[in-house]
Amino acid sequence: MTDSIQPAQNPLSALPNINELAEQASAARFAKARSDALSQSFFNVCAVDRVVPMKSPLRETVEYRLLIDLHCISMKDMSPELQASLPQIVDQLFARVMLEPRA
């Protein structure tokens, strides 16, 4: 009995579309940054900085400046209205980042 030799298969050929994987990775990165920014006892702008490119004009927006001003401010030291608005502000900024063309 003779074993037939199979040609080596490209391991990447079994992967789903790389663009789909890139989209999933990007979504995971934004979700992690959002969670890190909002899930502590203080607001963590470092997590936001990980997804807003350094040279992005979004760093000049009112939303970004507001978030910078809140860096390391305890949630208990914020008004209830500000606390409640933070997720929406972060989401709005992240949505704008996703629309920016990537360099």
Image (spheres, helix red, strand yellow):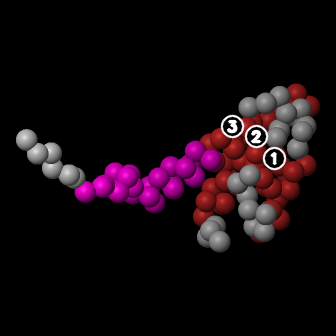
Q: Amino acid at mark 1?
A: Cys
Q: The residue tagged with tag 2: helix, strand or loop? A: helix
- Answer with the quarter of the image where residue 86 lies: top right
Asked if 43 appears above or below 15 in the picture, the reply is: above
Asked if 99 appears above or below 36 in the picture, the reply is: below
Q: Amino acid at mark 3?
A: Ser
- Answer with the quarter of the image where residue 54 lies: bottom right
Q: Which residue is mark 3?
A: 35
| Camera sees residue 89 | no
Q: The residue tagged with tag 1: helix, strand or loop? A: helix
Residue 69 percent location from the top left of the image: 91, 49
Marks 3/1 in contact by CB < 8 Å: the verdict is no
- Tell me the residue at 50%/49% (across/down): 24
Badge 1 crowding class, 10 Å Cα cut-off, few under 14, some 14 to 19, many 20 or more, is some
Instruction: Give the side of residue 97 with respect to residue 18, left or right.
Output: right
- Tell me the residue at 85%/33% (across/down): 42
The numbered mark at residue 37 is 2
Going from N to C along the chain, the mark reached first, 1 or 2, is: 2
Going from N to C along the chain, the mark reached first, 3 or 1, is: 3
Q: Which residue is mark 1?
A: 46
Which quadrant is home to the C terminus?
A: bottom right
Which quadrant is home to the N terminus?
A: top left
Q: Specify start and end residues of the magenta stretch as a single range.
A: 7-29
